[in-house]
Amino acid sequence: MKKPVYLDYAATTPVDPDVADEMIKYLTPDGFFGNPASRSHGFGWQAEAAVEAARGQVASLIHADPREIVWTSGATESDNLAIKGAVAGRDSAHLITSTIEHKAVVDTCKWLEAQGTDVTWLEPGHDGRIQPSQVFNALKPETVLVSLMLVNNELGCVTDTATIGAELRNRGVLFHVDAAQAAGKLPIDVSTMPVDLLSLSGHKVYGPKGVGALYVRRSPDVRIEAQIHGGGHERGMRSGTLATHQIAGMGKAFAIAESSLESEIRQLEGLRASFLKGLSELPGITLNGSEACRVPGIINLSFDGVDAESLMLGLRDLAVSSGSACSSAAVEPSYVLRGIGLSDELAHRALRFSVGRYTTTEEITFASAQIVDVVTRLRAVR
């Protein structure tokens, strides 16, 4: 068994070998290396064909029209484009979001708030979920947008986007959903889910880093102002030369995710059950988040009497996280765990374990045994 065992799939996933093979076709002199915007020769036409094929593959996973997919550099840019783009040009605007969104949403909304935009910050329940009634009660006549993530990146809990989105659609309020942690982990169907804007990432779905997409529903009611100018690419919503190799890689990754979605969900549920069973002999473990409304691959646990940093140091053969990769360098405890009501002390005892496509049963058995051993030793020397 290869060590260390990687249990941080929520931070990033390895690129699927078939995705890497696809990407190399668009990089070298004997490949399709042209600029997709070059319409005067075959090199550009071939690159454009690859970009459009990938657009269709990404759209297919979420049941969208390919024309509704806008390429970006990642979910962070998609979040910025959706939120800032919806507010831009409005004299008065009100946004609704939650305190436990990804930093890409939190920091964007804080920036807009500093510019004078009215922002309502919803507090989740102890299970990490925002209730639809909270959203509806926060609505104002000037509410422009609600932004909530589909799957929380630290807790794995799932937001009731169907109920929230249906009411927002009736009221004419735009609904943005960050689905970076949801794509490839649960079914997404924007043809039935009342969502107007949806952010996607390549590297969370076994594709390359540095590429993402924003689903923008084709409707006169959904108007997004570009945040990057210079060429009018992507139907005027996002300028910049398209990275053909990354886009082709993301498309291939999403096609694989679509074909293997059901089997991977079953695989991850099995790994999760084995992991928790392996820890069952260890007392004083608390699951953070929702047990019922969650994806299987993300497990956030607190260990009584054990500091997470000390535990990670003891788990030298495991790659795990004490929170979001975007916040893991901070000394402060996770704002997400604080947001669901954990004290600083309890939040400092939490670790996130996330499994994925290449996690094996052998690795899970090894990991749970290591955790039991290290936690037991740390508690003994308190």
Image: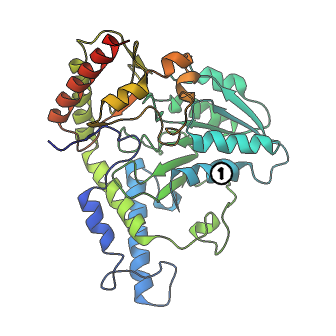
Q: Residue at x 56, y 24 (%)?
A: 130
Q: Up-down: is 273 above or below 281?
A: below
Mark 1 lies on residue: 222
Apparent side of residue 118 relative to residue 133 in the rendered image (left or right): right
Q: Residue at x 37, y 60 (%)?
A: 251
Give the quadrant of the C terminus.
top left
Apparent side of residue 245 relative to residue 333 in the rendered image (left or right): left
Picture quarter containing residue 41? bottom left
Label 1 environment density (alpha carbons within 10 Å; few <14, some 14–19, many ≥20) = some
Q: Up-down: is 168 above or below 358?
A: above
Q: Is residue 126 visible?
A: no
Picture quarter containing residue 249? bottom left
Give the quadrant of the N terminus.
top left
Q: How far across and down, in percent of the image, does residue 163 sit? A: 54, 28
Which amino acid, mark 1? Val
Furthest residue in direction front, as rendered: 381
Furthest residue in direction right, as rendered: 91
Dot 1: what SS? loop
Q: Is residue 122 visible?
A: yes
Of residues 202 and 14, which is closer to you in this image?
Answer: 14
Of residues 172 and 130, which is closer to you in this image?
Answer: 130
